[in-house]
Image (tube, rainbow, N blue to C red):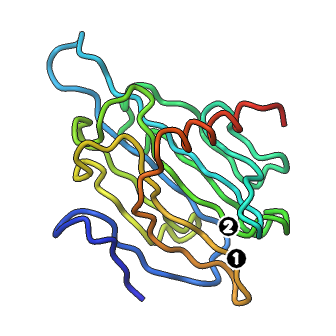
Amino acid sequence: MRITDGTGPGGGVHADAAAGFKDIVMGLHWDPPLGDARADPADLDALCVLFDARDRVLEVIDPHCPRSANGSVVHTGDSRDGASHWDDERIFVFLEALPEAVQRLEFFVASATRHAFHEVRGAQCHVSDNASEHEWLRLDLTVLEGRRSHAVAAVQRGAEGWTITAGGLAPDDERLAGLRRLSNRPQ
């Protein structure tokens, strides 16, 4: 099944709902500013939030807390300048290793420097199968005029396995700040 979030032709989210996949990766990329070396570079962050069946936050994985308690979710580290040729930040999720309590996880992107996504050259993200590199979702963040955070996708545990759906809503700054505070607590 093909779904979109309606952010516009040629841009936005396109996702295939799928069941039976095992390991996924969320990748985030952006480019440094052109020209002036003194320009204030953007710093975007990839986040993954793990929820239980009652919608309670179990863990938040981000650059400040790069590994889940059991190692089933791993963040590759904080990029602060977007200088990579491929993904600047990645989050790997090993679905079969997730604790049974985890029923849903959500991927977010947030601007740590308060740059709006449309101001960040080449800002984009994807959610892909880690083994086959099949891309379920790709989002051009630059089409999100004035936004500084975005819910990219949700991955839900079901009777037939895991399914993925496009996010589309920007969490309000207060909720996202609260989630990030959770990621800084001792594990």
Among numbered discs 2 and 1, the one appearing first in the sequence: 2
- The answer to whether residue 102 is left or right of residue 64 is right
* Whole-percent x, y for residue 169 in the image: 41, 59
* Whole-percent x, y for residue 124 in the image: 33, 50
> Which residue corresponds to mark 2?
104
Q: What residue do we see at 58% from left, 59% from top?
A: 106
Query: How many numbered marks have been drawn onto this rendered protein structure?
Result: 2
Are the residues at dot 2 and dot 1 in contact (C-beta closer than 8 Å)?
Answer: yes
Q: Between residue 172 and residue 179, name the one nearer to us.
A: 172
Residue type, mark 1 in image: Arg
Q: Label 2, secondary structure: give it.
A: strand
Image quarter where the C terminus lies is top right
Q: What residue do we see at 39% from left, 53% from top?
A: 125
User: Where 162 sits versus 44, above or below?
Assistant: below
User: Gap between marks 2 and 1, in whole Å?
Assistant: 6 Å
Q: Which mark is residue 157?
A: 1
* Whole-percent x, y for residue 176 in the image: 54, 42
Image quarter where the N terminus lies is bottom left
